[in-house]
Image (tube, grey):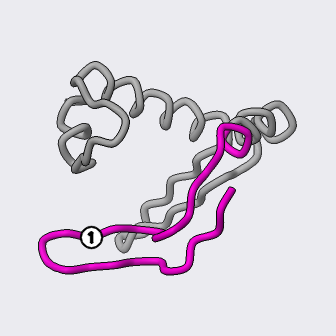
């Protein structure tokens, strides 16, 4: 894993996140290996402005990320393509 040197580079309408950083297959795979130990622990707790609360466990987050990746593949997205996440959200319906 290479550390990034800049968080955001923005020139309307283009933006890039975590400039200079990269992840390896090993660092990505380590996320999957932590699932058995933390399967039911809260990974993200989100509070909405109206008091609504959502809790994502590591297992649910892992499934949602995989679903999102598979949806992008079904839409024909390949490695290196630029994607607006709102497009994939529309695919879910």
Task: Provide residue 64's location: percent of width, then percent of height.
Answer: 48, 34
In what quadrant of the picture does the C terminus appear?
top left
Task: Provide residue 80's location: percent of width, then percent of height.
Answer: 34, 42
> Which residue: 49% across, 80% down?
6
Tell how many labels. Answer: 1
Name the foreground residue: 42 vs 90.
Answer: 90
Residue 90 location, quadrant: top left
Q: Residue furthest left?
A: 13
In what quadrant of the picture does the N terminus appear?
bottom right
Label 1: state its secondary structure.
Answer: strand
Residue 71 location, quadrant: top left
Residue 12 location, quadrant: bottom left
> Which residue: 46% across, 70% down?
19
**Residue 77 vs residue 58: left or right?**
left
Residue 13 drawn in magenta: yes
**Residue 64 vs residue 14: left or right?**
right
> Which residue: 51% across, 68% down?
20
Residue 68 drawn in magenta: no
> Which residue: 73% across, 39% down?
26
Q: Callout 1: 10 Å neighbours few (<14), some, many (20+)? A: few
**Residue 60 vs residue 8: left or right?**
right
Residue 55, compared with residue 14, is above or below; it is: above
Name the foreground residue: 55 vs 64.
Answer: 64
Span of residues in magenta: 1-28
Task: Provide residue 68's location: percent of width, then percent of height.
Answer: 39, 33
Name the foreground residue: 8 vs 93.
Answer: 8
Q: Residue furthest top?
A: 74
Name the foreground residue: 41 vs 88.
Answer: 88
| Disc 1 target residue | 15
Task: Provide residue 14's location: percent of width, then percent of height.
Answer: 19, 69
């Amino acid at each position: 894993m290479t550390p990034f040197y800049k968080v955001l580079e923005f020139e309307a309408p283009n933006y890039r996140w975590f400039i200079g950083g990269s992840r390896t297959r090993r660092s990505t795979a380590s996320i999957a290996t932590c699932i058995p130990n933390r399967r039911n622990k809260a990974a993200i707790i989100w509070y909405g402005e109206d008091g609504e609360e959502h809790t994502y466990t590591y297992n649910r987050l892992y499934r949602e990320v995989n679903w999102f990746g598979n949806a992008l593949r079904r839409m024909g997205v390949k490695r290196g393509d630029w994607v607006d996440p709102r497009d994939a959200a529309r695919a879910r319906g």
